[in-house]
Image: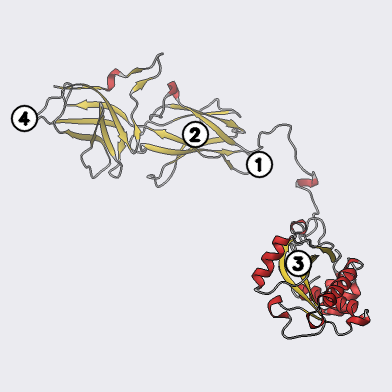
Amino acid sequence: MSAPSAIATVTSTLRNLLTQAALEDPELLDTTVTTQPPAIARNGNEANQLNLFLFSTSVDTAFSNSPMPGQLKNGESGMPPLALVLRYMITAYGRNDDDVSGHRLMGRSMSALHDHPILGRAEIQAALPDTDLHNQVERVRITPNVLSVDDMSKLWTSFQSEYRISTGYEVSVVLIESTLPAKTPLPVLRRGEEDRGVTTQPDLIPPFPALTEIVLPEQQTSALLGDTLILHGHHLDGDTVTVRFNHPLLTNPLEVPALVGSNDAQVSVQIPNNPADWVVGFYGVEIMINKAGQQDRTTNVLPLPVAAQILGIAPPNPVTRDGFGDATLTLTSNPQMRPEQRTALLLGEREVLAEDHLLQTDTLEFIIEDAPVGNFHIRLRVDGIDSLLVDRSVSPPVFDSAMEGTIA
């Protein structure tokens, strides 16, 4: 198919066509056809002259979304050709700048293009034979390009030349073949296992296991160690079903077997109450499913916040202030806290950071400077997750009385 020199081939073919048309008129035998910018086209020439100037190229979108016609079979893929539309302006110059001769030359050229709307294969091959444009399946067509007075004025202003009688034409489509190789896959010998063809199903549920929701007990906003979770989804049944919990602070994920009674649509799992192994924070939860004779599968990942649980406050309530008005609270939490975790005590509307601890521990110390006196709701915030303060097991919800502290 066409090489990048196809543009030059079209220009050369048009020049030959216009030259032949002019020489058929005895009054125009001195006509020359040039292909220069209008600003330098005349260049002292006093004879009849036609100037064929390519002033614009654009991409034909109709041919840019499909491969080169006749080159690819079904199932093969390749880059589409560069499909071009060429816009020419033809300017006529009369002998000794005589407008009558110029008009006669313009009429002869327009008549020739009107009677010759398609470039012939032999004409293209004779102009530049090395482009293979003449073998193009889509024919190269010539159509008038009507330019308004305003468009013509802008063009000649950009040419920086004095206006002469001109007309416009479009030539399309010129297909330049991509240099990238096409992909030709081998024929299909079997359509799936045992050549059974495409597997279909009567609904929109995907055929692989997936999680859709994690339900916490008592409408809690975060899970606690020892809680039983219900994981909803589809295709969750298997010979062995294991729930995996991933956390950034843990080197290895925690894997917990599903409880008895899990089925295709839901899996129940109890978070082990192992304070030393678990970390407060956001976990990624996924289910691993093993079935005999099938490949092991893993579901998508859903987020799960695991909160700290305040087990006790020392010294016993009420906490007394020292001589400077400061109070020291020591909390016992579950699970244990890591040194790199940001831990804070929320005392009413006040936030107090925990004292530094170098090792993993379940005992946290908080020094409350200029501690206020009174009863306060207490929360433990670890890496942005608060301990549970609201009891949602009753309606309407109430504050958990066990999460209250008193400073005297």
The x, y position of residue 63, in whole percent, is 77, 59
Is disc 4 in contact with disc 2, using a CB cutoff of under 8 Å? no
Is disc 1 in contact with disc 2, using a CB cutoff of under 8 Å? no
The x, y position of residue 137, in whole percent, is 86, 65
The residue to which callout 4 is attached is 323
Mark closest to the chain's N terminus, 1 or 2 = 2
Mark closest to the chain's N terminus, 4 or 3 = 3
Instruction: Look at the image and tell me in which quarter the C terminus lies.
Output: top left
Observer-side mark, 3 or 1, equals: 3
The residue to which callout 1 is attached is 293
The residue to which callout 3 is attached is 87
At label 2, counting other C-alpha atoms closer than 10 Å, the crowd grade (few under 14, some 14-19, many 20 or more) is: some
Observer-side mark, 1 or 4, equals: 4
Observer-side mark, 4 or 3, equals: 3
Mark closest to the chain's N terminus, 4 or 2 = 2
- Tell me the kind of residue under disc 2: Pro
- Tell me the kind of residue under disc 1: Gly
The residue to which callout 2 is attached is 257
